[in-house]
Image: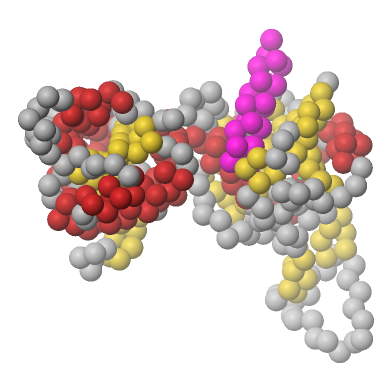
């Protein structure tokens, strides 16, 4: 089990660390919490202690020094995060000052480190703070940028503590190996919408969860990730560049713009196969008892990629309701993929909107049935499989 130290400094956003600590615990991490004296004015160590079921460290000297706590804590950390980080604590870290338990342990720790700032917009934008952040980055410390919005002081601007999901994403980034460093990954995700008239469209049930999980994991493994996404309700994973599109044609244009420079392309999107031939300029009125829409076929983006690929490793998906292996093998061949991830909509735990998936990998010489797992776990497996396939091509 990996140990994460959560260091809390004295910002109003300190209360948000309760959610973060709970979420990290649910992900099966061992958590230690260390607080500055000022942080205890915003949130009680008792609350955090109850959430992690162990004492919270506030004072380095509370047991007569028979254990040097800032050293023993630092040694057991796999990742150290300071959430929220004030301008003051960032300034101290930038300059090697360690006059409290959080900064002393942080300086002593050799594990990956992460800082999530939260403060007033003018304090954040102040050149001194920005210089301190830049200096910390030169030490290899990662940052989760604060969000923009209404701050506790009433000002509006940058300075809100990053969203818990983004912090967790960056914790997992810090804990992950980087086999995709210097690699570019393009992921398409979600459904497409094919307009009928200004108020209606044809779409499908794709939630985008599989594609978003792949984009998130590719970023954590070190890649520069572009996500071309149809309309979804999902948050764009931290660090991922997104291009939002609606129709299959818009997705095709966006893919054509960027596919050449990619190392990996993963087509997880559920692309509409047909579009309405003539989109009505005005709302179609219900004068008639029946309505016939003429549809024309959309280009198949994956087929285009398969025909034009040079060094890119390409992964397609196939969702089937019958003859899974037969249909998937046919798509793998026809679309010239390096890997095809096939699933059966009728299988328990697989399919649209779920957090899990049950798939079969089709590759050149292999059909591999994969057990039911979360889309996050499956993303890791798919990316590792693609890395292996690329390595085998370059041998
Ligand atoms: N795909 C694509 N462009 C399309 C349709 C599909 O790039 N116009 C891609 C999907 O993103 C997926 C793969 O092709 O990676 C298979 O999609 P799927 O809908 O399962 O298959 P289709 O080729 O559309 O065939 P069918 O609908 O007949 O099953």
**Residue at image location 15% in from the left, 25% down from the top:** 68
Magenta stretch holds residue 379:
yes
Q: Can you tell which quarter of the image residue 315 is in?
A: top right
Question: Can residue 130 be seen here?
Answer: no
193 relative to 287, above or below: above
Say above or below: 248 vs 359.
below
From the viewer's side, name the closer residue of 230 and 170: 170
Per the rendered image, the range of residues in magenta is 375-395
Point 36% across, 47% down: residue: 21
Q: How many marks?
A: 0
Q: Position of residue 304 (x, y in %)?
A: 79, 39
Judge left or right: residue 205 versus residue 329.
Answer: left
Q: In the picture provided, is 113 more to the left or to the right than 180?
A: left
Where is residue 249 drawn, in percent x and y? Answer: 74, 54
Magenta segment, prevailing SS (helix, strand or loop)? helix
One can see residue 113 in this view = yes
Toward the viewer: 364 or 40? 40
Protein image colouring: secondary structure
Image quadrant assignment for residue 326: top right
Image quadrant where one finds the N terminus: top left
């Amino acid at each position: 089990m990996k140990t994460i130290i959560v260091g809390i400094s004295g910002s109003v956003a300190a209360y948000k660390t309760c959610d973060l600590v709970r979420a990290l615990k649910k992900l099966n991490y061992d958590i230690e919490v260390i607080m500055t004296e000022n942080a205890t004015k915003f949130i009680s160590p008792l609350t955090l202690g109850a959430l992690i079921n162990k004492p919270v460290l506030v004072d380095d000297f509370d047991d007569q020094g028979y254990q040097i706590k800032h050293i023993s804590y630092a040694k057991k950390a796999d990742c150290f995060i300071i959430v929220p980080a004030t301008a003051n604590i960032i300034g101290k870290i930038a300059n090697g000052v360690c006059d409290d338990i959080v900064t002393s342990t942080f300086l002593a720790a050799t594990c990956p480190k992460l800082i999530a700032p939260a403060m007033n917009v003018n304090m954040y934008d102040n050149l001194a703070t920005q210089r301190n952040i830049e200096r910390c980055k030169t030490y290899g410390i990662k940052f989760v940028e604060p969000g923009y919005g209404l701050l506790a002081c009433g000002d509006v601007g940058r300075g809100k503590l990053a969203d818990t999901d983004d912090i967790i994403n960056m914790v997992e980034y810090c804990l992950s190996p980087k086999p995709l460093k210097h690699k570019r990954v393009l992921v398409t995700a979600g459904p497409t919408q094919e307009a009928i008239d200004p108020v209606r469209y044809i779409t499908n049930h794709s939630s985008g969860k599989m594609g978003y999980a792949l984009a998130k994991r590719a970023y954590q493994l070190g890649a520069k990730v572009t996500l071309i996404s149809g309309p979804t309700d999902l948050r764009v994973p931290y660090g991922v560049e997104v291009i939002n599109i609606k129709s299959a044609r818009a997705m095709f244009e966006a893919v054509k713009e960027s596919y050449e420079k990619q190392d990996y392309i993963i087509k997880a999107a559920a692309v509409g196969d047909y579009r309405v031939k003539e989109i009505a300029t005005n709302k179609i009125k219900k004068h008639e008892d029946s309505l016939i829409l003429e549809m024309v076929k959309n280009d198949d983006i994956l087929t285009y990629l398969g025909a034009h690929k040079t060094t890119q490793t390409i992964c397609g998906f196939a969702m089937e309701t019958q003859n899974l292996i037969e249909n998937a093998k046919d798509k793998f061949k026809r679309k010239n993929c390096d890997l095809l991830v096939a699933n059966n909509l009728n299988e328990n735990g697989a399919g649209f909107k779920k957090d899990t998936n049950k798939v079969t990998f089709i590759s050149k010489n292999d059909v591999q049935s994969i057990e039911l797992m979360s889309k996050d776990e499956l993303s890791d497996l798919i990316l590792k499989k693609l890395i292996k396939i690329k390595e085998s091509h370059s041998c």
